[in-house]
Image (cartoon, rainbow, N blue to C red):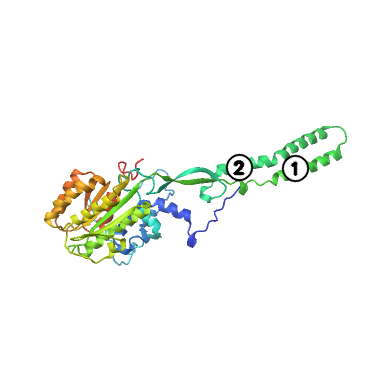
Amino acid sequence: MAHFIDRRLNSKGKSTLNRQRFLKRYKQQIKRAVSDAVGERSVTDVDSGEHISIPKRDISEPLFHTGKGGKRSVVHPGNDQFTTGDRIDRPPPQGGQGAGQGEAGNSGEGEDDFTFSISKDEYLDLLFEDLALPNLKNSQFDQVVQYESYRAGYQTDGVPTNLDIVRSLKGSMARRVALTAANRRKLRECEEEFERLKADKHDNTLALLELEKTIAELKAKIAGVPFIDTFDLRFKNYARKPVPTSKAVMFCLMDVSGSMDQATKDMAKRFYILLYLFLSRTYKNVEVVYIRHHTQAKEVDEQEFFYSQETGGTIVSSALKLMDEIIRERYQDSDWNIYGAQASDGDNWADDSPHCREILMKNILPVTRYFAYIEITERQHQSLWREYQSVEEARPNFVCKHIISVNDIYPVFRELFERTNEHSGVDN
């Protein structure tokens, strides 16, 4: 029997295969924990790893045991406290139940939740799973490079997880047949000759001894051929090929006026950091254009977009005008997929809101694949929201979402970019 031993080195003594199986098995619980963790992180810590806790009851294994068999008659004691239909209150939590819940008690026992850490890559994979840019068209094949894996035959080396056992055993059998065929044929002839001389009435002792020696040598040669050799091993080969996609640009518009307090700005930054991580991790060479605005709009770099302290009044149309100008100057080519995301607290000069709707309807939305407006406020919606709602009703590629607290950011983000059959991310 052949034994295949996995001698790959795993960091810190961890088993890579077992970890992958564990993450796959408890994927739903881990995804819920990752979703809850987004709102609890600081703006600068959105893309790091995470500590995940899973309740002990979720990872406990079912047990089978032998009960009392046979036919039995049991007499139970009477009940002097409850009657049919009574409702029994849930007992209060007791100490010793684990997971740090409840108050101290003098009885009871339990187990703490199972806690483990996931890496940055595992965290981001779970965070952006099943998300895609809506309506991305295959109009140009030189920018957004995506890859898919496909089977590409076999190779003679690889990792043990890709080992094809059947193919390897077939190779082993073919090698052993090729190396031992001549000896087996000669062995068969010697055995037939031995039986013939043995049945002969003449004295053939010397010939029989010589044949016995030859037969033993041939059997030793045949047995000396190993059952399996490294030459026989065949590993499944997977290659990656680029999937035709197209050029894309994402416009990020953020209101930095005086009405945007620090908490609102932090929530807007969280949304845009998620968007940036999603784009940079999922797509290659997607261009991002950052626009900050108060009464005037300005195209800025990533550092200034997230950390500049500049502020002022509020004229939202200035950002939309600048976006329109940039599109005309740099992205007028029909091969570009243009996206927009705007975050604001909804405060705007009242006479400017209808102008914003006009710019969107006439200039921006006809050339964009998707435009998302995020309003971050606890106040009543103002004129900008009402104008944008009319745009949402008229244009399928425009959507408005409302965020009140930090915990709303990730669910809204998933709603905006969740992969669907209609918007699969890349049209074929």
Q: Nearer the viewer, residue 409 or 209?
A: 409
- Count the marks: how many? 2
Percent x, y of residue 311: 20, 65
Please tell me how crowded label 1 is: few (under 14), some (14-19), or many (20+) other residues with Cα within 10 Å.
many
Instruction: Using the rendered view, name the quadrant where residue 95 is placed.
Output: bottom left
Q: Secondary structure at mark 1?
A: helix
Tell me if residue 342 can be seen.
Answer: yes
- The reply to whether callout 2 and callout 1 are in contact (CB within 8 Å) is no
Along the horizontal axis of the image, is 212 left or right of 245?
Answer: right
For marks 2 and 1, give the one nearer the viewer: 2
Q: Nearer the viewer, residue 187 or 318?
A: 318
Quarter occupied by the C terminus: top left
Percent x, y of residue 13: 49, 61
Picture residue at 60% right of the left edge, 48% below the top: 2
Percent x, y of residue 267: 25, 60
Along the horizontal axis of the image, is 234 left or right of 251?
Answer: right
- Does residue 397 sit above or below 10 in this rendering? above
**Residue beneath disc 2:** 171
Q: Residue furthest front?
A: 329
Instruction: Using the rendered view, name the quadrant where residue 298 is placed.
Output: bottom left
Q: Say what amino acid the circle numbered 1 marks.
A: Leu
Q: Nearer the viewer, residue 298 or 304?
A: 298
Q: Say what amino acid the circle numbered 2 marks.
A: Gly
Q: Which mark is residue 218?
A: 1
Picture residue at 40% right of the left edge, 51% below the top: 25
Percent x, y of residue 254: 24, 58
Q: Residue furthest left?
A: 351
Quote the CA–CA distance across marks 2 and 1: 23 Å
Q: Nearer the viewer, residue 331 or 100?
A: 331
